[in-house]
Image (tube, helix red, strand yellow):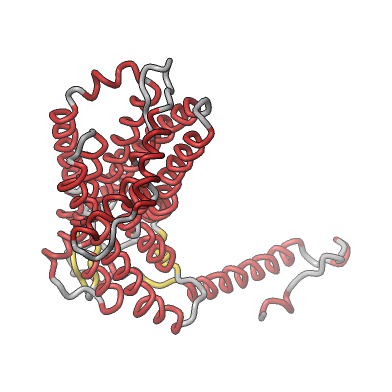
Amino acid sequence: MQSARHMCSVTDTPNKMQDGSQCRICCDRVQADINLLTRQLAAAFIRPSPVNNMTNNTEESEIIYYDEETSDSDHHMLHDYILPVLYSVTCVTGLVGNLLIIIIYAFYEKMRTLTDTFMVNLAMADIFFLCTLPFLAYQVAQGWIFGEVMCKITRVVYRINLYCSMLLLTCITFDRFISITQAKKFNMYHSKKHSLGKLVCMIVWLVSLLLAVPQFKYSVTSNENCFEVYDPPHLEVMVNSFQITVGVFLPLAAMIFCYTFIIKKLIFASNYQKHKSIKIIFMVVMAFIATQLPYNIGILCHVVYKTFDKTFMLITEAIAYMHACLNPILYFFVGVKFRKNFWKILEDLRLAKPNMELSDNLKTTDRESKSISVYNNTEAISMNQL
């Protein structure tokens, strides 16, 4: 470093200093060299935001994009192969699983409970979102070529799916909360299940649509990218903070609150039923936290601190999209009833023979479910229907 030869030795005594200002000059030069080195290192890792390439009527973005220390081949592998394949698998698996849910409820279970109504609407929301995944997969690999209208639609559909899924999961949680902790009121609560279920689902869809309106208004395309640009810029912080708080954090807090009381109540259930119920509860809560929370926290940090780690956001975004295909697995594939109905579908299509062992397991599960009372022996409620 050029200023090194001007540095003052820390062992110099005041007697050796010709002038008090000489040391200050040396320190100033050292500090200037440190600042220069810092700027050079930062320039090696900072990339300008693509929003800066917008037309002149859009303000210059203050967002700083940080690239991780990954090679070009790693980015090429992630963009061109890993994410498109992951999106494709999520799309196919999710469509098959959620269509099975709708078929089972339409022809086999007949939507007997409020939870059934919520689950069908949850499957519909996931199907709508999964239909947009092929467009998002192509964008990751090749860029956005589908126009601004389709850009708005895909971003709106994801937000609707996110908020609708969260609110419906909260409704399912509250339904389980009432059935287990307030069993005396459960019969009266479920006597109006059909009208109540339709009303709640209509409100959930309406609220989700209203929360997603900003994505339709502010989504734009530029340089083969589909993203959001807010004018004035501070509006982005207000909108995203409100959306994530109302659509994610508040429902999550409600779920944790309800499941805490559910677990306390189930502590006194029989061993088999207790462990199975708690297992399903933790699978539901942890699956949402693992898939949705990292991505939404990344969005919040992006809009508040104006920093953006592209690789982190791409990976967490893909994980968040996987939530649409995990719901059928979490709520149905772990239950005997879903496997029974799935096997019935295969039997009706003449693709499988009757499975007597599965039928016996279902009868055993039903008997164990009916033998449990969690509230003064007045009502027997099982979490196995999930």
Q: Position of residue 349 (x, y in %)?
A: 19, 62
Q: Position of residue 94 (x, y in %)?
A: 28, 60
Q: Position of residue 251 (x, y in %)?
A: 34, 37
Q: Work out which residue is located at the far left of the displayed protein and give it.
A: 149
The residue positioned 20% from the left and 43% from the top of the image is 208
Question: Is residue 152 left or right of 366 when viewed as pictured?
Answer: left
Q: Nearer the viewer, residue 9 or 105?
A: 105
The residue positioned 25% from the left and 73% from the top of the image is 139
> How many numbered marks are there?
0
Question: Is residue 221 left or right of 82 when viewed as pictured?
Answer: left
Res 21 quadrant in image: bottom right
Question: Is residue 378 left or right of 202 when viewed as pictured?
Answer: right
Q: Nearer the viewer, residue 163 or 43?
A: 163
Q: Position of residue 55 (x, y in %)?
A: 18, 69
Q: Does residue 328 appear in this view?
A: yes
The residue positioned 51% from the left and 38% from the top of the image is 275
Instruction: Please identify the quadrant where the N terminus is shown.
Output: bottom right
Q: Nearer the viewer, residue 175 or 314?
A: 175
Instruction: Please identify the quadrant where the C terminus is shown.
Output: top left
* Above or below for 66 versus 208: below
The residue positioned 39% from the left and 81% from the top of the image is 76
Q: Does residue 124 appear in this view?
A: no
Res 58 quadrant in image: bottom left
* Above or below for 298 versus 93: above
* Above or below for 177 versus 41: above
Q: Work out which residue is located at the far bottom of the displayed protein and give it.
A: 73
* Above or below for 338 versus 227: above
